[in-house]
Image (cartoon, grey):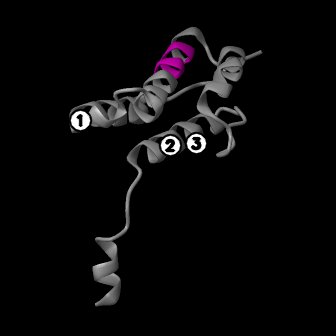
Amino acid sequence: LGALSLKHRVQRAPLAALAQRLRQRLRGVGIEAPDHLDLHRLRPQLAARLGLEERQQGLYLIDQLEALRYGRDRLATGPSELRALRRAVRRFRPRAVQA
């Protein structure tokens, strides 16, 4: 019974979870994306490792995540913006460019 009541007390960080999912996708194509590294520091690696379309999608996702996490109006973020970003991260399937 104690475990069931604890479940409702655990706070969630949905934007952190989305950032983690994005990092996992990038690691899948060989981009070094450790958890401690800020997302904006991944930009040079995206340019070097991804094709144009995937790079643009990745940069857009990084921009959106950072705006929602650190932007001035982050507290005004509604559920619809979060759902749209979640869908975009889920659809993001990067492929590495063959060198």
Numbered disc in front, either 1 or 2? 1
Q: Taking 97 as reference, is 33 above or below it?
A: below
Residue hosting label 2? 21
**Residue 64 locus on image (x, y percent):** 43, 25
| Outermost residue, top side | 52
Q: Is residue 87 magenta?
A: no
The disc placed on residue 78 is: 1
Please give left or right for residue 46 compared with residue 70 in the image.
right
Camera-side residue of 22 and 62: 62
Q: Residues within 10 Å of mark 2 (few under 14, many from 20)?
A: some
* Amino acid at circle 3: Gln
Helix, strand or loop under label 1? loop
Q: CA distance from mark 1 to mark 3?
A: 25 Å
Task: Residue at 23%, 38% (x, y): give it.
Answer: 79
Bounds of the magenta segment: 55-60
Q: CA distance from mark 1 to mark 2?
A: 20 Å
**Residue 10 locus on image (x, y percent):** 37, 67
Helix, strand or loop under label 2? helix
* Amino acid at circle 1: Gly
Residue hosting label 3? 24
Numbered disc in front, either 1 or 3? 1
Please give left or right for residue 85 compared with residue 61 in the image.
left
Task: Residue at 68%, 38% (x, y): give it.
Answer: 37
Q: Are marks 3 and 2 in contact (CB under 8 Å)?
A: yes
Q: Is residue 77 visible?
A: no
Residue 67 occupies which quadrant of the picture?
A: top left
